[in-house]
Amino acid sequence: QVQLVEYGGGLVLPGGSLKLSCGASGSGFSINAMDWYRQAPGKERELVARITQDGITNYADSVKGRFVITTDNGMNIVHLQMNSLRPEDTAVYYCHANARIWTWDAVRDEDYWGQGSQVTVSS
């Protein structure tokens, strides 16, 4: 019931900035929390940043002070502003949403993922 589409990503020089965005669409849902994960080659997927419907944010230690997660449109859009990028930030970045789904007979929480966006930090 929820589709996530990511925008942004690309190649950037070390020290540069890049912004990722992710839009949620569908019907009969509300967003509990949205996150950005990343997965570098040969490594496990890791949580980068999270924002809840109460506006509470959390960041991985490796990106604190450099990345900022924000939302628009009642949490249907999430952005990740990435500053002071380093080569070790190179990864595929995934948008993730935990959503509350209402149907005629039930209410349940489900997880959804975006398609992934390549971010490459290199000179």
Image: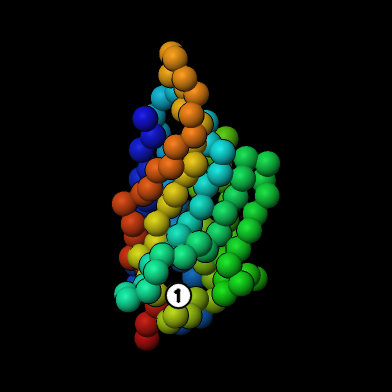
Farthest-out residue, top:
104
Count of picture labels:
1
The residue located at (40%, 43%) in the rendering is 112
Residue 18, compared with residue 112, is above or below; it is below
Farthest-out residue, bottom:
123
Q: Position of residue 101 (x, y in %)?
A: 46, 28
The residue located at (31%, 52%) in the rendering is 115
Q: Position of residue 114 (x, y in %)?
A: 36, 49
The residue labelled by disc 1 is 89
Residue 21, compared with residue 4, is above or below; it is below
Q: Is residue 50 left or right of residue 101?
A: right
The residue located at (57%, 54%) in the rendering is 50
- In the structure shown, which secondary structural element does the residue marked by tag 1 occupy? helix
Assess disc 1: are there few (<14), some (14-19) or many (≥20) residues with their C-alpha within 10 Å of its C-alpha: many
Task: Tell which of 30 and 80 is nearer to you.
Answer: 30
Residue 98, compared with residue 102, is above or below; it is below
Q: How is the image coloured?
A: rainbow
Q: Position of residue 23 (x, y in %)?
A: 43, 42
Task: Tell which of 15 and 39 is nearer to you.
Answer: 39
Where is residue 39, by image quadrant?
bottom left
The residue type indicated by label 1 comes to Asp
Q: Is residue 76 visible?
A: no
The residue located at (40%, 56%) in the rendering is 94
Q: Is residue 52 left or right of residue 119?
A: right
Residue 16, compared with residue 77, is above or below; it is below
Image quarter in which the C terminus is found: bottom left
Image quarter in which the N terminus is found: top left
Q: Position of residue 19 (x, y in %)?
A: 47, 60
Q: Is residue 53 visible?
A: yes
